[in-house]
Image (spheres, rainbow, N blue to C red):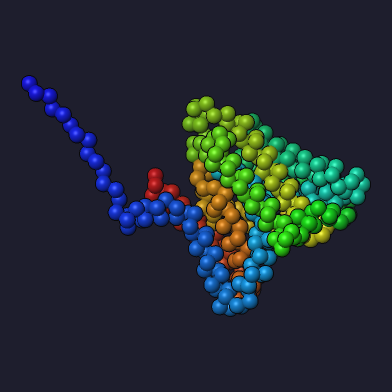
Amino acid sequence: MSQMTTTPVERSPLPGSAARASWLSRNRAFLIPYLLIAILLAAAAIRAPGFVSAPNLTQQLVLASYLGVIAGGQTIVILTGGIDLSVAWNLNLSAILLTQLGAELGVLPAAIIALGVAALVGLVNGLGVAYLKIPSLVMTLGMNAVLSGVTLVYTNGSPQGEAPGFARELAVGRIGGLPWALIFWALFSAALIVLLRRTVYGKRLYAIGNNMKAAYLSGVPVRRVLVATYTIAGLCAGIGGFMLTGYSQQSYLGMGDFYVLPAIAAVVIGGTSILGGSGGYAGTIAGAITVVLLQNVLQIVGIQSAGQQILYGVIILLMLFVYGRNARVRE
C-alpha cells in the first residue's frame, strides 16, 4: 500500500494593493493624528499664511514638548487601563518646590526634592491602585485634592521665587539655533519608546492592559509593574512642571489645571486605547502636536472660547469613537 504524501500549499503573497490596505488598517490609529496635523496646518495656511513659517512652527513644537512630556506619563498609565488625574497639582507642587526651595537651599537640592516628591506622589498612587485595589480614577482624583490642599498650606496662597536658570534654559533656551526643549523631548521620546517596545517592562505593561488577570496568571508581577508605572508618571509630571516653570519664569497656583484634559486628549488622539493594552508613545507625540495646533488654529479662525471647547470635545469624542469601533471590529 503506497503512502500518500501531502505537499504544503504555498501561500501567494498579497497583491500590492491588498498589502498596502493591510498595512493601513494595522497603522490607522498611528496615521490619523498625523493626518490631522496636515489638515490643521493647511487650514492655518489658508487663514494666516505666516502661521506655517519655520519660526512659528518651531515655537508650536516647543509648546507641544511641554504637553508631550506630561502626556508621556499619562500614556503608560492609560496603557494599563488606568488614568492619572493627579497630574495637575503634582505638576504644580513640583514647580512651587523648585522655585521656593531653590531660593532657600540652592537649585540642585531643590530640583532633587521636587522630583522626589513628584515620584513619591506617583508611588503612593501606584500603591493605592495595586495593593489597595482603589480604582485609578478615584485614587488619583483624591490625591489631586490632597495635593491642592497641601500646596495651598505650604505657599499660604502665594508662591514665591523665580524659575532657576536651568529651567529657563530647558524651556526657552537654544543651542546652535535649536531649542533645548525639542532636544530634551527627542531624547525623552526615544527613551520612552524603547522602554515600551524593547524591554520586559514594556511587554508586561501591554499584557496588563490587555488582560490583567491573564497577565497575573502568566507570572507577570502586576503589582510591581503598576507601582513602577504610576511612579514614572509622577516623575513625568514633575519634569513637566520644571519646563512650564521655565517657560513662565515663575510658579503659580493652578498652572497644572490646563494640562490634565489636553494630556489625556493627546494620548487618545495618538491612538492609545483608553481601555489599555494598545497604542504607544509614538502616537502620543503626534497627539500632543495636534492638540497644540488645534488650540492655536481655533484662535486664528476667530472661534470664541465656548466654540473652541465644543470643537475640542467633539474631536476627542470622534477619536474615541473611531478607535473604539476599530477595537470592536478586531475582537
Could you tell me if residue 259 is visible in this image?
no
179 shown above or below 111: below
Q: Nearer the viewer, residue 129 or 189?
A: 189
Is residue 298 left or right of 250 when viewed as pictured?
left
Q: Residue at x 49, y 54 (%)?
A: 30
91 shown above or below 7: below
Q: Residue at x 32, y 56 (%)?
A: 16
Q: Residue at x 72, y 61 (%)?
A: 176
Position in image of residue 8 (x %, y %): 22, 35
Q: Nearer the viewer, residue 69 or 137?
A: 69
Which of the 4 quarters of the picture holds residue 41?
bottom right
As drawn, which residue projects farthest toward the left?
A: 1
87 shown above or below 3: below
Could you tell me if residue 196 is visible in this image?
yes
Task: Locate the C terminus and report the quarter of the image it occupies.
Answer: top left
Q: Nearer the viewer, residue 122 or 24?
A: 24
